[in-house]
Image (spheres, rainbow, N blue to C red):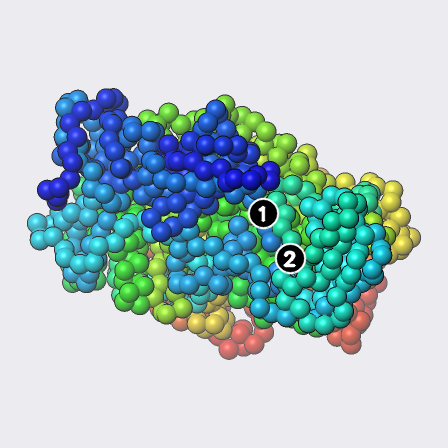
Amino acid sequence: MESQAFQKIYTKLNNITKATVTLKAADVGYDEIATVHGRMAQVVKLMGDEVTLQVFSGTEGIPTNAEVTFMGRPPQLKVSDDLGGRFFNAFGDPIDGGPHVEGEVRDIGSPSVNPVRRKQPSQLIATGIAGIDLNNSLVSGQKIPFFADPDQPYNQVMASVALRAKADKIILGGMGLTNDDYLFFKNIFENAGELDRIVSFVNTTDDPPVERLLVPDMALTAAEYFAVDKNESVLVLLTDMTLFADALSIVSNRMDQIPSKDSMPGSLYSDLARIYEKAVQFPSGGSITIIAVTTLSGGDITHAIPDNTGYITEGQLFLRRDTDIGKVIVDPFRSLSRLKQLVIGKQTREDHPQVMNAAIRLYADAANARTKLENGFDLTDYDERTLEFAKSYSDKLLAIDVNVDTDTMLNIAWELFSKHFNKAEVGVKGEFTEKYWQK
Amino acid sequence: MERKNKTTGKVAGIVANLVTVKVDGPVAQNEICFIYHNDERLMAEVIKVIGVNAYVQVFESTRGVRVGSDVEFEGHMLEVTLGPGILSRNYDGLQNDLDKMDGVFLTRGEYTDPLNREVKWEFKPLAKAGETVSAGSWLGEVMENSIPHRIMVPFKMEKRYEVKSVVDEGEYTVDETIAVVVDEDGKEIPLTMVQKWPVKMPVKVYKHKPRPFKLLETGVRCIDTLNPITEGGTGFIPGPFGTGKTVLQHAISKQAEADIVIIAACGERANEVVEIFTEFPELDDPRTGRKLIERTTIIANTSNMPVAAREASVYTAMTLAEYYRTMGLKVLLMADSTSRWAQALREMSNRLEELPGPDAFPMDLSAVISNFYARAGFVYLPNGETGSITFIGTVSPAGGNLKEPVTESTRKAARCFYGLSQARADSKRYPAIDPIDSYSKYLEYPEVQENLVEVVGEEWLGEVLKAKDVLLRGKEAMEQINILGDDGVPISFHDRFWKSELVDFVILQQDAFDSIDASTPMKRQKYMLAKVLKVADSEFEFAHFEEVSGFFKEIINFFKQMNYSEFESEEFKKHENRLEDLIKERRN
């Protein structure tokens, strides 16, 4: 950590709590960072000449005569093309053994984009996963989380989405990643030979939890550099936002704030929105797309974290284990991409919207048939056929190991329609049925 | 709040956007002040005073602000600027013109003029010398796009005045004097086209405010037919995320029979606001033949913009609505979402360390919401004209739970409830308004019933109630079928269930993306409802339960084709005839 010779050093702390220290100091700005006993801290309260600092890594072992130096600036990141291929911690310091990155200094947590200067998102992001591309197409400039239970392979899915999406840059913001998951990302990026277009900011479970509050802002500051200065399309991966929110609740609890629903701070919605709303399509061509992970506890989406997230993001992707085929699928019922209307049937084949809806409707009929079966009622011939269809649909399209282009997905869907149903049962517009029905 | 000397102060403490200021003179609750930080002026509002300390909420980020920074108090509350040129603008929550701001990012401390001071308006006098006038009296008018924009005696002028002179017809800028009035003491007061008004105070320069009694057509069938809203009425749309709140709000704002539409995008997604920015300038306005944007103003305070300005944004929108209402216009105000506004209140209350109410919302949440909804309404102006503000807010209930404080408080304040149902949204039945839980209190008003008879017809009310009945009976039948199985119930249960499906598919479900189906005029709604009810009243012959669904699916298909065709066109009649034949064949 750099320090400057003319800075005043304070050595008398008045109060120490688990997360904060208080001292008398002059000419300190709000949000400014400081070092306390060599640890990174940030100003969270000014009252007269008393300054309260939040020490990111906790106050264990800090003595009342600890040295405090104020840096006279908010947290910053040096941005340049040299960020590519590098791994950093929550403070933007390298953790891959490489040198410090030189570049232009930027304050993290920049202001919002003027809404009239945004452009409506319109560029499809193809991932090869039919559960996404066919049913929930992603669009650049979108923000969308995976809602997943902790035992589901969301990091794997996210990594393949990232590598297949044709983004100029991928920025990983890892919060509370286990060391194993960190190494997983590192390996998969290295093996793909794409390290140069990937920048990672990682806080692992070895690091103090409160530090991870800086990770999204670091990642997004880097993203804005590439999207605004370089007009690049940037994909930001944030995993796991639930652990980020948990860190918010730890801080608010230590600051004696009154918790609202599920012990979360009352400002949770604004705190999450500030991050997710960085997703943007700029008129100049640059864009920031955010794919995040919100882990659920027992699939409960009414918990404050997924609930507030759902109101902010443009849809959500659910993963589910389909016991019929023994694979993880993208759940077509609960998943939603709010921006898909902007691209499907426009940038993809004309029959896309109708095929998507027909397949999901038939899949829903299969679900009803299954309920009937479970309740001991007789199945009709149609019911039997929907069940067969559902199994193939799940296996050939919904499963996360699928990797084909959108036209192929549509052809597979037509193949399944033709095999299991007659034209009236599928109910797609006549002109498409004429063209694509497979005899 | 007029003072000779400006009160000043110094910053004494900062926690997030709550700043403590030590003041050297009088300050008022809700007074506006500016904090000086380097070259920037940050706007803030007083929300609490203790001794010499004023607690102010800053409308911007407080990053870098220091103890000891200078503060100047303005001597007035948060005000909006009212005058010609508000329509088609995109404002932020503090009425800054977003299009006038430089750069891609919002710059802290940049405030832009809401009006254009150079434009010359074609002014036509309405008042004459010698007339007695008071606040809100019309002095003249200019054409703002295609809307007659009345230039009024400023709302702040509380006495009675005599008009000394009004300028001749001609072109004037908003800042030029267009009239001179004389007060009771003989003091001459020159007036321009511009006035200011504090947003938190309701504009009350009307004569009286009766109960709303006139139907406001929205073109959305499950609102107009089942649970209509009135001119000057209030309604709210609660719904979990993904149930189509925003699409429904956009549909209403595009189609409703209003002169002016004001949209407050309060703490919602920026891309949705961009959709309005992109779409509205392209959309034709069926009422005027011009573009929809010409009679629309958008207040955009997206979720990532400063939270205190989010709280202000709904008040700014309401005040603009009141301004246009006083011109004798029908205003539709949409706020999406009022929950975000309530959350902004919660964040501040939390920082002020107030004792919290349920879910940590402030104790007075319910009162604040009620007061706000009460500003809507239908009014008679002193000159005998009428104006109205119809207010529809969306609510985003936490966890989809309609028992949470914001939904509960709003339920007490709003007269129409359009509850969006997750189950309907999941099965793609849009708009997902639950037909059974939703209500319109206005249907019970005798004056509204009278208006409906006059506008729609004698038999209308009875038909509406019958349709509700069919839906309810269908739901009960479905529950029985689910418990006992398809063949465990008499065939009449299937008949009853499918009759309710018929009402659901033909009347309730509506395709917001189809050019014809998106908006249904009242005349057509009446025709279709009568037709559907005729089927619901008929008795049919079925041998087996499986025949029931087949038959109804077929007639629903013809009804839907009718919905997609131009009313009373060849095509429409063709489907109608096929439909009639089918029904005849089956009828007992």
Q: In which quarter of the image is residue A395?
A: bottom left
**B359 up-or-down from B32: above or below:** above
Q: Which amino acid does label 1 sit on?
A: Glu
| Residue B149: % across, % down | 71, 62
Measured Cα–Cα span from mark 1 to mark 2:
12 Å
- First reached walking from the N terminus: tag 1 or tag 2: 1
- The one nearer the camera, B24 or A114, is B24
Q: Which amino acid does label 2 sit on?
A: Val
Quadrant into which the N terminus of chain B falls: top right
**B341 up-or-down from B94: above or below:** above
| Residue B30: % across, % down | 55, 37
Give the residue at mark 1: B79
In the image, taking residue B464 as reference, residue A321 lies left or right, namely: left
Q: Mark 2 lies on which chain?
A: B
The secondary structure type at the circle numbered 2 is loop
- The one nearer the camera, B566 or B497, is B566
In the image, taking residue A424 as reference, residue B287 lies left or right, namely: right
The secondary structure type at the circle numbered 1 is strand
**A31 up-or-down from B335: above or below:** above
**A299 up-or-down from A227: above or below:** above
Q: Is residue B376 visible?
A: no
Front of the two marks 1 and 2: 2
